[in-house]
Amino acid sequence: MPSTGEIKQRIQSIQETQKITNAMRIVSASKMKRAKKQQAEAAPFFYDIETVMVDILSHSAEIQNHNFDQRPYKTGKNRNVAVLVMTGDKGLSGGYDINVCKKAEELIAKQGDANVEILIAGRMGQEYFRKTDHKVDEDFIYPVRNPSTTRANEIGKLIRERFDNETYDDVYVVYTQCKSTIAQVPTVLKLLPLNADDLKASLGITDSTAPDSMLNYSPNPHEVFKVLIKKYLNWIIYTCFVEAFTSEQCARMTAMKTASDNAEEMLEKLNLDFNRARQAAITQEITEIVGGAASL
């Protein structure tokens, strides 16, 4: 059995580690609440954009936009696919980063002979995919901490430009959707090209149920739609950023709580061992005193 000094040293070490894990759990909880508040504050604006876009699509049959270009003439090796993967910037979050990277690899495997390029946001994803044979855009370096509309706008502009010049024919986003504090689900979302029917379905509107338009557009619906669709795509990227960041904080909260609970169990066992070792030492001292007195 280890000595009481060794056990006491281990107890102190675990207690210090437990303080760190508890502090990290509290910080992650604070960041998660802030991210959810950001998303809730911006959600009405996004809903209005989506509603107006659907209204224009339902009542302006002449609307044509390149963001809906499906490009069926490009198949196999002639088709270029971009996969935007959102991972964390730091570790100690359980299986969060591995799960989203595995989901991205599943998506890539489904693309067949298409040329796939990976755009990675988050340091952990960069470290993961640079060790693989996948084609990674080395110039695409964006952190995921502190999500902002500015960062989402920059990424959205880059992706739209590459889609417009046919560098990309399909664009997917792989991120983690935060279902609850203990449930985070890796999710695949097709960003481009857009589908008008899917857009209407997201609001529960079909051509037969679309209400009469009560809006007037200046200078015309086509120009308004061009402006709104950019904001729409930027908002989707921003939402994915917030969801990924929130999921990372939830995963880290769970991991740190588990670590703290394990530390508590270890402390209970070590305290028991410490008491046993101290009792054995006291018994030994008494035995030696009694033996010495008897010899006298």
Image (cartoon, helix red, strand yellow):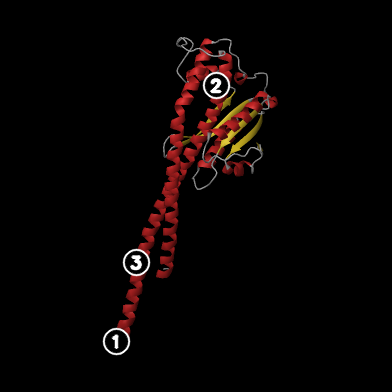
Q: Are marks 3 and 2 in contact (CB under 8 Å)?
A: no
Foreground mark, 1 or 3, reads: 3
Mark 2 / mark 1, whichever is N-terminal: 2
Q: Work out how far the residue at label 1 is from the one at label 3, CA to CA, in angstroms.
A: 28 Å
Q: Position of residue 135 (x, y in %)?
A: 67, 36
Can you see residue 168? no
In the rendered image, which residue does mark 1 sit on? Answer: 294
Task: Tell me the tag on residue 274.
Answer: none
Image quadrant occupied by the C terminus: bottom left
Q: Nearer the viewer, residue 283 or 16?
A: 16
Q: Which residue is mark 2?
A: 228
Mark 3 lies on residue:
275
Mark before the other along the chain sequence, 1 or 3: 3
- Tell us which disc is closer to us: 3 or 2: 2
- Frontmost of labels 2 and 1 is 2
| Residue type for callout 2 | Leu
- Give the CA separation, mark 2 to mark 1: 98 Å
Type of amino acid under label 3: Asn
Q: Residue at x 58, y 19 (%)?
A: 226
Tell me the element at label 2.
helix
The residue that appears at 45% across and 42% down in the rendered structure is 31
Position in image of residue 165 (x %, y %): 68, 24
Quadrant of residue 174 within the rendered picture: top right
Rendered position, 169 above or below 268? above
Residue type at numbered disc 1: Ala
The front one of 219 and 194 is: 219
Q: Badge 2: how crowded within 10 Å, few (<14), some, or many (20+)?
A: some
Instruction: Please tell me how many numbered marks the rendered image carries.
Output: 3
